[in-house]
């Protein structure tokens, strides 16, 4: 909704993407279906990106809230999925809530720091491309590592 | 413990990858910023993920209980290494029901922490249970990796059928040589008056019947019926079972066998068991508490085993069916092998009483006219079988679910008394 209000153009597209993602998230939690939950967050991120794109180059200030919001929503969604099989004891519930609050605060600080440190005002640039390439390689390595770990446990 | 990646790890990796690649391709920094918390959560979560080490000990407060009793299950958890979120599930077999405590449960254990969990289970059905497969699933603090393990902590629990109150038992026609509570037809030492006879050298003075002696002018002594025990063989048909809604003819038969065996043992009779079914089991006749527990333990292990092999009485070892024993058969009369074996027993001269555990309450006529006709034919065939037993001189009594066993046994006893009078 925030992305729709901020969008200069194609507000309907942003709204449709956002609303579709929310519906998918609700379905994913009700089903429960982890792939649907992932899809919904991809949709929300895409909706925000389209909204930001309509406002030209540079990351808008609302990106901090959007990034933290999506992260917290993802944490809560996977927490909910875990509750489907076994509900947490009250003591564990309190500790996890505290942990989530700390992670949300850390994410907020991290995104704000990244915005400030990288001075992301002018969209793109060599620095951002270098970070993106490094991250892509690191992710590929992580995926390979996880795949190998999966093969080491043939009983699963 | 087997380790695997949770859906959350896959989702975070995908979101990070898409965010960073999207930022790179479309030259949009927002996507990279959205991906950043996920990337950091992945890095921190995976670097701190450790396999938990939790020991589980499981114990019942009692290993032998009666049906409808409650039993406490104590679980002791000893965390050698911390577990951020440990899900614990104790597999509870059918027949037991959780009435207190939480199962499954999710909890957090610190390193070196010991935790005790108490569960109360209601024993709904008799049986020999092996409870104790404990399923553990632990997640790291970030919920990215999970470890699963199944611990086989088999704790035996024997749930005995609750014995029914029986006012009367079927009295065996013949008694054996050992002392017991049954009035024998033979004369000997006992309390029940049998007859009078003239005094003979060696007779004790206390046995002289003074009134009869005064009337006849000579010494006459009282004679008594000896008090002996009897042999009772419980013949349990486990070839077939009619079931509906968690209960069936076998359950009914086993409850009856447990109740009856207990009462006969209390009356000092020797009780044996023949479990005639897909798997053949037997217990030679014996007496006392040990024999009672042996019988009930054997009954608990009874189950229907599908078998097409033809079995006859000859397969039983010598001594399992002693001469002059009362054979009390508990059968739904569904299998021809049992029908034939019981007729064979009667032909060999055994005192046979067949308690037919009726499968009718567990059966419904199939829909349609032909189904109804088939059902009627089936019932007629059953009546034919009953007549066959009666022609052979064995008593058959039909026992419907819900009728007290004591009423059935009293009916059998009364019928046997009348039969004796007629003879």
Image: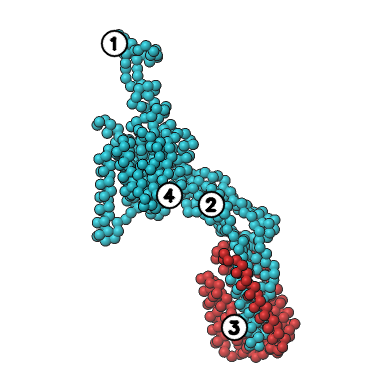
Q: Chain of mark 2?
A: B
Q: Chain of mark 1?
A: B
Which one is closest to the eye, mark 4 or mark 3?
Answer: 4
Can residue B252 be seen by looking at this rendering? no
Query: At numbered mark 4, what does the secondary structure look like: helix, strand or loop?
Result: loop
Locate residue A21, reporting x and y percent: 55, 79
Q: Which residue is mark 3?
A: A46
Residue in the image at 68% along x and 83% along y:
A132
Task: Note whether B26 is above or below A69 in the view shown.
Answer: below
Locate residue A15, reporting x and y percent: 56, 84
- Quarter of the image holding residue A141? bottom right
| In this picture, residue B81 sits left or right of residue B204 | right
- Quarter of the image holding residue B181? top left
Chain coloured cyan: B
Query: At numbered mark 1, what does the secondary structure look like: helix, strand or loop?
Result: helix
Query: At numbered mark 2, what does the secondary structure look like: helix, strand or loop?
Result: strand
Q: Which residue is mark 4?
A: B303
Mark 1: few, some, or many residues within 10 Å (few <14, many ≥20)? few
């Amino acid at each position: 909704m925030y992305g729709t209000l901020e969008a200069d153009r194609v507000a309907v597209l942003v709204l449709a993407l956002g609303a579709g993602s929310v519906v998918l998230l609700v379905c994913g939690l009700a089903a429960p279906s982890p792939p649907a939950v992932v899809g919904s967050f991809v949709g929300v991120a895409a909706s925000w990106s389209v909204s930001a794109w309509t406002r030209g180059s540079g990351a808008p200030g609302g990106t901090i809230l959007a990034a933290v919001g999506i992260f917290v929503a993802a944490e809560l969604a996977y927490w909910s999925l875990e509750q489907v099989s076994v509900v947490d004891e009250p003591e564990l519930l309190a500790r996890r809530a505290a942990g989530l609050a700390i992670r949300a605060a850390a994410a907020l600080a991290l995104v704000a720091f990244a915005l400030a440190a990288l001075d992301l005002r002018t969209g793109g640039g060599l620095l951002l491309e270098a970070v993106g390439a490094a991250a892509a390689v690191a992710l590929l390595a992580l995926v390979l590592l996880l795949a190998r770990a999966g093969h080491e446990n043939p009983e699963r | 413990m087997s380790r695997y990646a949770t859906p959350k790890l896959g989702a975070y990796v995908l979101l990070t990858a898409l965010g960073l690649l999207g930022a790179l391709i479309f030259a949009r920094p927002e996507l990279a910023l959205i991906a950043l918390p996920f990337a950091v959560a992945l890095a921190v979560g995976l670097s701190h993920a450790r396999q938990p080490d939790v020991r589980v000990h499981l114990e019942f407060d009692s290993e032998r209980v009666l049906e409808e009793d409650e039993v406490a299950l104590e679980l002791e958890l000893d965390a050698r290494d911390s577990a951020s979120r440990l899900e614990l599930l104790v597999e509870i077999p059918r027949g037991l029901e959780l009435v207190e405590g939480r199962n499954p449960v999710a909890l957090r254990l610190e390193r070196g922490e010991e935790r005790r969990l108490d569960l109360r289970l209601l024993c709904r059905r008799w049986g020999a249970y092996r409870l104790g497969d404990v399923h553990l699933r632990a997640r790291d603090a970030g919920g990215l990796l999970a470890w699963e393990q199944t611990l086989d902590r088999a704790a035996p629990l024997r749930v005995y059928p609750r014995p029914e109150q029986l006012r009367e038992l079927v009295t065996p026609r013949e008694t054996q040589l050992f002392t017991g509570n049954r009035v024998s037809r033979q004369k000997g030492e006992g309390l029940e008056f049998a007859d009078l006879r003239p005094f003979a050298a060696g007779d004790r003075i206390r046995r002289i019947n003074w009134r009869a002696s005064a009337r006849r002018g000579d010494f006459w002594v009282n004679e008594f019926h000896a008090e002996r025990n009897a042999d009772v063989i419980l013949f349990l048909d486990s070839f077939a079972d009619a079931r509906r809604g968690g209960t069936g003819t076998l359950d009914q038969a086993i409850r009856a066998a447990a109740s009856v065996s207990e009462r006969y043992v209390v009356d000092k009779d020797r009780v044996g068991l023949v479990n005639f079914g897909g798997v053949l089991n037997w217990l030679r006749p014996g007496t006392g508490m040990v024999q009672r527990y042996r019988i009930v333990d054997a009954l608990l292990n009874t189950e229907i085993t599908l078998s097409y092999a033809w079995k006859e009485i000859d397969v039983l070892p010598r001594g399992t069916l002693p001469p002059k024993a009362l054979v009390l058969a508990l059968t739904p009369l569904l299998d021809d092998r049992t029908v034939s074996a019981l007729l064979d027993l009667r032909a060999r001269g055994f005192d046979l009483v067949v308690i037919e555990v009726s499968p009718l309450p567990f059966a419904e006529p199939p829909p349609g006219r032909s189904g109804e006709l088939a059902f009627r034919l089936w019932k007629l065939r059953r009546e034919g079988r009953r007549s066959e037993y009666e022609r052979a001189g064995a008593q058959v009594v039909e026992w419907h679910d819900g009728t007290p066993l004591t009423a059935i046994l009293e009916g059998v006893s009364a019928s046997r008394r009348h039969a004796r009078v007629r003879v």
